[in-house]
Amino acid sequence: MPPTEASALGAAKTVTKATVGERLMLALRSADASAGPLRWLALAVLALAAIFPLIGGPFYTRLGIETLLLGSVALSVDILLGHAGLLSLGQAAYFGLAAYISALMYLHVTQSFWLVLLAVMVAVGVFSFLLGAVAIRAKGVYFALITFGAAEILSKIAHNTRAIGGSDGLLGIPVPRIPLLPGVVLDLHSNLVFYYAVLAALVLIYLATRRVLATAFGSVLRAIRDNADRVPYLGYNPFWYKLAAYVLAAQIAAFGGLIYPLLRGFVAPNLFGFEVSTQAVVMSLVGGVGTLIGPLAGSAIITFLDSLVGSYTDRHLMVLGAIFIVFVMFLPDGLCGLVRRAFIAFSGEVHTGAPQKTRQTQNAPRREVSP
Amino acid sequence: MLDRSSLLCFAASGALALALASGSQAADAIKVGVVTPLSGAYAPIGKQVRWGAELAVKEINAAGGVKGRPFELLFEDEEANPPVAVRKSEKLIQQDKVDLITGTVNSGSTLAVGQLAERNDRILVTTVSYAPTITGAQCSPNVFRVNANAFMQSNALTAWLAKNIAGKRYFFIGPDYEMGRSTIGAFQDDIKRLGGTDVGATFPPLGAKDFTQYIGAIRAARPDVIMTATAGNDTVRLLTQLKEYGILSDKLTLAGAAGAVTQENIGAMGGAGDGFLSSAGYSTDIDTPANKTFVAAFKKEHQSEPDLFGADTYGLFYLLKQAIEQAGGTETAKLRAAMEDATWQTPQGTKKMRKGDHQAIVDMVVVKVKGNDFQTVGKVAGEEAVGPDKCDRF
Amino acid sequence: MEDLLPYLHFVVLPQVIDALIIGVALALVALGLTMIFGLLDVINLAHGDLYMLGGFAAFTLLGWGLGYWSALVLVPILIGIVGWALEELGIRPLLPRADRAVVTLLLTFGVSLILRDLAQVIWGTETRAVAASLSGVVSAAGVIVPSYRLFVFAFAVATIVGTWWLVYRTQIGAVLRATAVDPAMVASFGIPIRWVYGFTFVYGCGLAGLAGVLLSPIYAVFPTMGHDFLVMAFAVVIVGGMGSIIGAVVAALLLAQVQGLASLWIPPVWAETLVYGVMLLVLVVRPAGLFNRLGAA
């Protein structure tokens, strides 16, 4: 049914006349209301992640670390898409930026992890603030294109600047030993130590993000996601909230980038690439947008699938594209959302979140689907 | 994959037959990981690499393998993307327990996988990457190269050009990235050394589609020779557009890197590439019985002629066979020692490994494009072309 | 000073002319993109791959013995059909969703991956040539332009003018523009909106296919060629104003000139970055683009 015929036929009847798509989006909306099922899911995922390296062996443990790092990029996509209504196609910009700064600092400046961490946080913070300030002013989908463009520019700059390795990238980043507390040193030469350290850090990041989004800040953000035009009437300036979310998301993506060179020992311009950004979006979608645990689960699923598919056929791009399309069209709230709905249906509870929320495309008021 | 299982069948039956015949133990397969771009822009090269490997392994296994042990190839698609290449290589090394790795194409991947190989005590052999730094400033005790590098190509080509082309005005076009710039740099240095005049150089972005903006500069420079380091589609576009604008003529000589015009893009030139000169370690018309057999076998197996990537990869496996037999196994230190001093036979002739930097010394041929084919017009001996050993990391 | 005139004549002028031709080709590609977004709110990331399919279709048709001119007519129709299939199966079900712009962007991205791989499976990885039926150069006042490029220029301009005429001077165009402004109103006149959307999408895809066949003799054909224009096309659409035909043309000409002239003075690689910078600038100063949408006055 063409989008606006629905609105033309009667505003008040929107709930009953809502299409499958809209009802799905409604179910998706209550990210904090249905904490129950998601919490169990998160615990299950965490348990799986915790025992994984014990059954995996060195390669899979290291692959698991890389999955966690990419998962942080996916998480950053989810914060923006699922909670602020912003689709960013350029989170790889921060992944790559963090990776390069991390690599450069380790190669030329210092061996101190904490100093590197500080440098990355500051650099990414400044860059995301500036870019975000420009990008957020643009409406709706323009934001996606600007973020995409920014990642492309950074990729080109990295590719063409010989001083930072050019198209070959930088090699030789050492595996560090990180002093945590006096007397306690994280020796990342051990795959298990590396894995659990990254897992612990990511769990902390996840919990912190969850907490932040459960506050009033998160509520305003979700209000902006659902109906940006109304929010100013409530006394909030959407711009600063979106910008804050963007800067936060950038830091989380940067975490992945910070650790990557420590794991793989090199950086290359591909880390800024479209593939990284879009993989993060795919992971988020497959896992479940808005669920926060979804992208992390999605990261594991996609990485595993990619590896599996690659062993059977060279046509893995086609398979990935097909999976992507299936999820976009039929499973918009991803696997975690699916699990959550099943859980809700099974337990007989009714979670509707707030009534009659609609997502508004931010281009022009006349595009509104329902009031 | 179908081919993997049929290879396994071959390998299994070959090993079994040998075991029954000689009474020796049926040894396990020698696993070689081939990490090469099977999709994306570099897929044509990966395809040749794969074909070369498969043909060599088929032949070797059918003839009894390496002292009874068959080769087993494990392919992974690296998409010419170093992070992916490293991930796949790590899988091959740690999970599939390959004995060594080959197949990387672009220099970024080769360098990154080379570092991984070093950290995991395995050997990486590249049969395609021609960035000099791989056996130069960024050399590694675990990385070997059996193909001619850009330096060698330039040496051979410019020597031939200086001798055979009357005009001395040279214009250079290279894609603006590490490989393009260093290849053009090598060309420029050599031409200057040989008495030519550098009348201009320009660096379009990699993947540029329109070269018309450089044509004005080319025309103004009035060169006798245009040397290019473009590859694949870039070369097709450059040359067709030069032809479009009437720049090409009998008085202008086209020359460039070996990767500029290959089997994969020669068909698309529409005559624009006629007369293009390059120097490579291989050409299909090298007149030795070994090469004739090889080309025929390759055509029969894959319905296409081999190019330098296919030929060099094919030749690698004969080096490996020889080295593994000499080392008595695939233990890295012994294998390295055996490979470092190796001299082995390939379709294009004898290759010798240089111990100091793990660069193979390859006899170069200068080839000229004629229609859809390559014709050898000159030869430069390997020792002459190879250049100094610039590796001091080991 | 005496160097300036020859410089302008032999370096700058040819550059301007070349960029003009490239700009018009770019406008052709961007036109389809902007019409689809202007009317349907759909960002078609597979647009570049439809352009690629156009090139391959031309290659295949010529391989079957058809002449170049027949291919020029047939290919846009063929690609239009592909576009129609995409619209029916993929886009239409997603249109009712409130987040349609985001979701269709993601969908077309998945389609793009599939098309690219599919092309490699069907046609292989080699680069292919399409021979044009025109060769030779035209020379005037010391400036040389290949005849085929002049043809491309003329044909593209004709197509653009034709499209403009279609949208602004015909009944169909009136319906199109009205639907962009207020679909509900148009629906209430009894006009089937779904056909309007379908037609627009098919037309946009047909334009991409046309660009593919038109440019294939110059740029050769290979599976990843969709990337050629896609990024620049999006920059054009953003700068010009999503949905504006005039905007697409002006922006395409402008950006092509910026890139072309900039490459004379800075390394060409950075010229592309400059174009991005211009895009960002426009987004800051005038987020809606230089011109207004399809329907607006």
Image (spheres, rainbow, N blue to C red):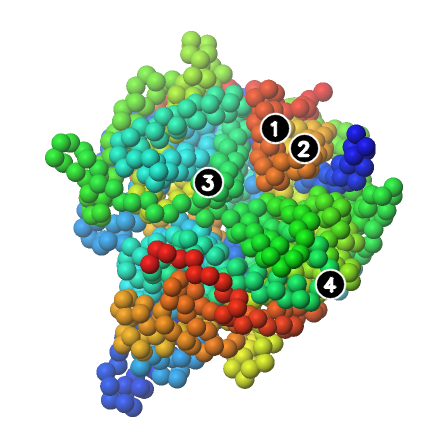
Residue A190 in view of the camera: yes
For mark 3, does the 10 Å Cα neighbourhood hold few (<14), some (14 to 19), or many (20 or more) residues?
few
C-alpha separation, residue under disc 4 versus residue under disc 1: 47 Å
- Near mark 4 (Cα within 10 A), the count class, few <14, some 14-19 or many ≥20, is few
Q: Nearer the viewer, mark 3 or mark 2?
A: 3
Q: Amino acid at mark 1?
A: Val
- The mark nearer the N terminus, 1 or 2, is 2
In the picture as drawn, the residue positioned furthest to the left comes out as: A183
- The type of residue carrying mark 2 is Val
Does any portion of residue B265 appear in the rendered image? no
Q: Position of residue A203 (x, y in %)?
A: 24, 34
From the image, tell me which residue sits under label 4. Answer: B166
Q: Are marks 4 and 1 on the same chain?
A: no
- Dot 1: element: helix
Q: Residues within 10 Å of mark 1 (few under 14, many from 20)?
A: some
Q: Which residue is mark 2?
A: C258
What residue would you read off at disc 3?
A: A163
Mark in front: 1 vs 3: 3
All told, the count of numbered labels is 4
Residue A40 picture location, percent across and down: 23, 36
Q: Which residue sits at x=63%, y=28%?
A: C239
Badge 1 vs badge 2, beta-carbon distance below 8 Å: yes
Badge 1: chain ID: C
Q: Residue under mark 2: which chain is it in?
A: C
Q: Nearer the viewer, residue B58 or C295?
A: B58
Q: Residue under circle 1?
A: C278
Q: CA distance from mark 1 to mark 3?
A: 26 Å
Chain of the residue on which disc 4 is drawn: B
